[in-house]
Image (spheres, rainbow, N blue to C red):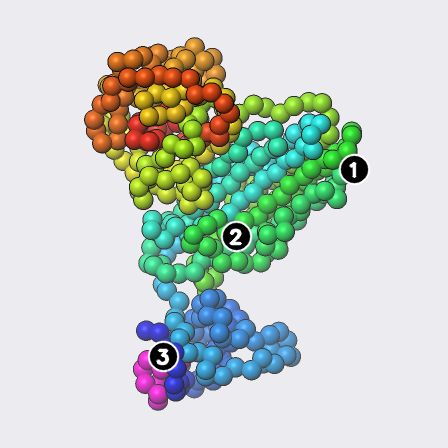
Amino acid sequence: MTIESSGAISLGTTAGTNRSISGELGGTQPHALSEYYRDGNYSDGISISAGSTSIPTGGTGSNYYGQAISFSDFHGVTAPETGNLSNTWFSGGLGQQEPGFSWANESFTSTTNPQAGANLGFQNDQTNDRIAMRYSTFNSGSPQTFSYAYISYTGYATETFRAKCQYSVTAGGFNSSNAENPSSFSPASNTYANISTSSYSPQWQWIVEATSSASTCTLQASSGTSASDDRPYWTVANSTETDTVSGPESTFGGTTTYGASVSLSATYGTQGGPAGPGICIHEDMLVSTQYGEQSIHDIKESSPKIWSWNSSTNEKELVDLLQIYIVEHDNLYTVNNLKLTEDHPVYLEGNIRASINPEKTLENYELTVNELAIGDKMMKEDGTLETITSIEVLSGDYVTYTLKTEHNNFYSNGYLVDSEI
């Protein structure tokens, strides 16, 4: 029960049960107001949320009580929620802790201001009772790629979760001053920040860039013998930091390594970067999610559950979003009302996959599919089949996407299409 927002307040119940500091925040007699500074060091059954910012934090050492504390600081304060956060760190499809070994390991060479980087952020997905992690490794010559992982919680309907990262990354190379170590919006090492319920925040990001001929910029963090070593090591916690989970960490041969290694390098030179995937859908094609049809750009920021087709049960299912690729392409076609690249498979009657150019699909992705033709019937989200009446070239360069789900498919503009990542 929240303490009243105005009027008299007491330590005990003199002013009423809904005006009692100890009744809401805990504590046993004899009470003292100085016990209730918001400093994270509580005893006597006291529990105060980090989000109760009207209560002063006190201070340190001999000046601990230098900040005045008064009864009015407790108007409108609510005790922290109780619940359970997953006791295991985020994991991927192969069971390894995320971000995986390839995160923040990128080397890129170009004569056009080459960049390489990595970022990671969290979001509190209250609708699905989980904390979502989004992470990416990138360079200036490749498509945007985002991966997602999740941990669940129970009982925390409105809890303010927090996250922090312990890190010590070292910049090097002739262009070392160009390194974002980390980017300015990243919280300082070992500093908690509240996790947003509407976007990926906080985020930590590291970027290297080379701007002059024959120069290099690097960022390195390889030592991970403890949780306080160089490699980025995250902790997610409830508002009172009594329910926490930390990672990543891995154990091989009896030795535990903490954190994710960082090895980023940008070199000004003539070697180009890798091309992006060819299989993609036009950005205007909306994806079917738990909230209805959404743009890929909105999905990237909110990571909702995605409607997918389970070919084993022949049923539609809501599944987790695992990856997103966003890249520009010039080899698109329009098939009825669906815009896609020539090598992107769609699903036809009987769960048969087909693309406009099966040879390209096989060449690029080692996937054997049929060739789309007028008269074929495409599977739709509403359970019906739609006969293909037109296949036309869509000239120009367009932003495109694909995304990965548990069943390797999703609904785009109402049509069942393949993930093929």
Read off the magenta span: 12-21
Asked if residue 14 is among those painted magenta in the image, a careful observer would answer yes
Image quadrant assignment for residue 371: top left
Q: Residue at x 46, y 29 (%)?
A: 400
User: Residue 135 versus residue 402: which sits nearer the camera?
Assistant: 402
Image quarter of the N terminus: bottom left
User: Residue 148 versus residue 152: which sits nearer the camera?
Assistant: 148
- Going by the numbered disc 1, the residue's amino acid type is Phe
For label 3, the crowd category at 10 Å Cα-Cα, with few meaning under 14, some 14 to 19 and many 20 or more, is some
Asked if residue 147 is among those painted magenta in the image, a careful observer would answer no
Q: Position of residue 312 (x, y in %)?
A: 25, 26
Measured along the vertical axis of the image, is residue 248 above or below residue 236? above
Please identify the residue farthest to the left as the structure is shown: 384
Image quadrant assignment for residue 18: bottom left
The answer to whether 376 appears left or right of 132 in the picture is left
Q: Position of residue 115 (x, y in %)?
A: 65, 35
Image quadrant assignment for residue 109: top right
Please indicate, yes or no, whether residue 22 appears anywhere in the rendered image: no
Q: Secondary structure at mark 3?
A: loop
Q: Earlier in the sequence, mark 2 or mark 1?
A: 1
Q: Residue at x 72, y 35 (%)?
A: 210
Q: Position of residue 64 (x, y in %)?
A: 60, 78
Q: Secondary structure at mark 1?
A: loop
Q: CA distance from mark 3 to mark 1?
A: 60 Å
**Cβ–Cβ under 8 Å for marks 3 and 2:** no
According to the picture, the residue beneath numbered tag 3 turns out to be: 4
According to the picture, the residue beneath numbered tag 1 turns out to be: 174
Q: CA distance from mark 3 to mark 2?
A: 32 Å
According to the picture, the residue beneath numbered tag 2 turns out to be: 202
The answer to whether 29 appears left or right of 169 in the picture is left
Measured along the vertical axis of the image, is residue 282 above or below residue 291? above
